[in-house]
């Protein structure tokens, strides 16, 4: 199953794991500062059982040069 399919099926933890890996590679402190967050808040948000706020996701994605996009679902036949 592709990553996109897993996300569409509701596997939101996959997205958090991927973002955690990117943030870790860039450095939690650097990303947190750029996103206007405390490092500890960022770290806790991306723990395995973390549940980041939309504002946290938006700030982190912006710092990483990305943004969240919403598209309509395909209609069922």
Image: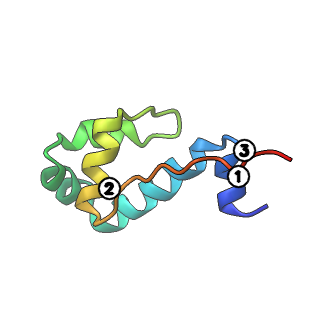
Q: Is residue 70 above or below residue 47?
A: below
Q: Which residue is mark 3?
A: 9
Within-10-Å neighbours for mark 2: few <14, some 14–19, many 20+: some
Q: Quadrant of the N terminus?
A: bottom right
What label does residue 6 carry, if any?
1
Judge from the rendering whether residue 40 lies leftward or rightward of residue 22; answer left or right: left
Q: Quadrant of residue 47?
A: top left
Coordinates of residue 35 in the picture (x, y in percent)? 18, 50
- Cβ atoms under marks 1 and 3 closer than 8 Å: yes
Label 1 element class? helix
Residues under labels 1 and 2: Cα distance? 20 Å
Mark 1–mark 2 CB contact (< 8 Å)? no
Left or right: 32 as drawn, with respect to 58:
left
13 left or right of 50? Answer: right
Residue depicted at x 25% and y 38%: 40
Can you tell which quarter of the image residue 55 is in?
Answer: top left
Residue corresponding to mark 2: 61
């Amino acid at each position: 199953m592709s990553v996109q399919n897993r996300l569409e099926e509701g596997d939101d933890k996959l997205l958090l794991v991927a973002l955690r890996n990117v943030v870790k590679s860039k450095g939690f402190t650097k990303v947190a500062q750029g996103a206007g967050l405390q490092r500890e808040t960022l770290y806790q948000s991306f723990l395995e059982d973390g549940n980041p706020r939309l504002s946290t996701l938006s700030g982190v994605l912006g710092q990483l040069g990305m943004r969240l996009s919403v598209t309509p679902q395909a209609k069922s036949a």
